Amino acid sequence: MTNTRREFIKKTATCVAGVSLGGILPGFGARSYRNIIGANDKIMVACMGVNSRGLAVGSNFAAQKNCEVLYVCDVDSRAADKCIDAVEKIQHKRPMPSADFRKALEDKNLDVLIVTAPDHWHAPAAILACAAGKHVYLEKPCSHNPNEGELVVKAAVKYNRVLQMGNQRRSWPNVAAAIGELHAGVIGRPYFAKTWYTNNRPSIGKGKEVEVPSWLNYELWQGPAPRQPY
């Protein structure tokens, strides 16, 4: 871990985010739901990082009757605009843009931060959200490294926040039910299991240094990461 990142994490850790909780996106358990929703009739969420996967997750939350996407946060204004338009069509209410998710965390009406930003932002964003009194839905991976994961857990415990990490194969009810059957002995004692994954993605290639485009807040994108030219 670089000194810059270590210092950033140390600062956010003074706020000191999470145990992977059950339930499928974007539902929390009944007890957790009551803790989150309080006196409101809807869970108010902010989506951080809404390009590709983030757009899908944000749209999913917007489609839930008990949720409203209040903020869309992205350093790429193009991605933010696209997500805002998509969410508005689903929930029939336009979410507010906030390039810096930390501004959204200042809103007392906000209940949950959804983190689908690049991996290096996962732990810092989750810790800051917990410290701000917000619950967190955190896409995998939980953190950039194991140490940051421990800081995330400490923050969730310290601030008594609900933090769910988005692992479909652990949160999907059908899979959870199947695992329950295995634990109950439906096939006896398992002696061997095998799994594999194949997805031959091509290389992203090597680019050349260019000017930062006008639609990107590159400084905020780098966040706790070491500074590099664009």
Image (cartoon, rainbow, N blue to C red):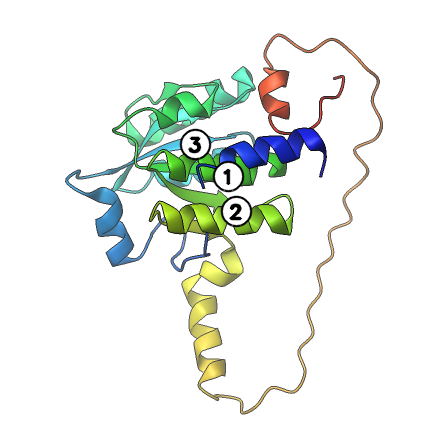
Of labels 3 and 1, earlier in sequence is 1
Vertical placement of residue 71 versus 144, above or below:
above
Mark before the other along the chain sequence, 2 or 3: 3
For the point 44% across and 67% down, the residue is 174
Q: Given contact means CB atoms under 8 Å apart, are the residues at marks 3 and 1 in contact? A: no
| Residue 202, percent from left and from top | 80, 40
The residue where tag 3 is placed is 47
In the structure shown, which secondary structural element does the residue marked by tag 1 occupy? helix
Q: Is residue 3 visible?
A: yes
> Which numbered mark, 3 or 1, is in the foreground of this view?
1
What residue would you read off at disc 1? 13
Q: Is 75 above or below relative to 69?
A: above
Residue at x 45%, y 42% (from the top left corner) = 16
Q: In 3D space, how far apart are the residues under numbered discs 2 and 3 (Cα atoms)?
A: 22 Å
Say what amino acid the circle numbered 1 marks.
Answer: Ala
Q: Are marks 1 and 2 in contact (CB under 8 Å)?
A: yes
For image coordinates 30% across by 31% down, the residue present is 110
Disc 2 versus disc 3: nearer the observer? 2
Q: Can residue 118 be seen?
A: no
Q: With 106 as the anchor, is 119 left or right in this view?
A: right
Q: How many marks?
A: 3
Q: Horizontal placement of 183 versus 204: left or right?
A: left
Give, as a three-letter code, the residue at label 2.
Leu
The one of 58 and 141 positioned closer to us in this rendering: 141
Residue on which the image places disc 2 = 151
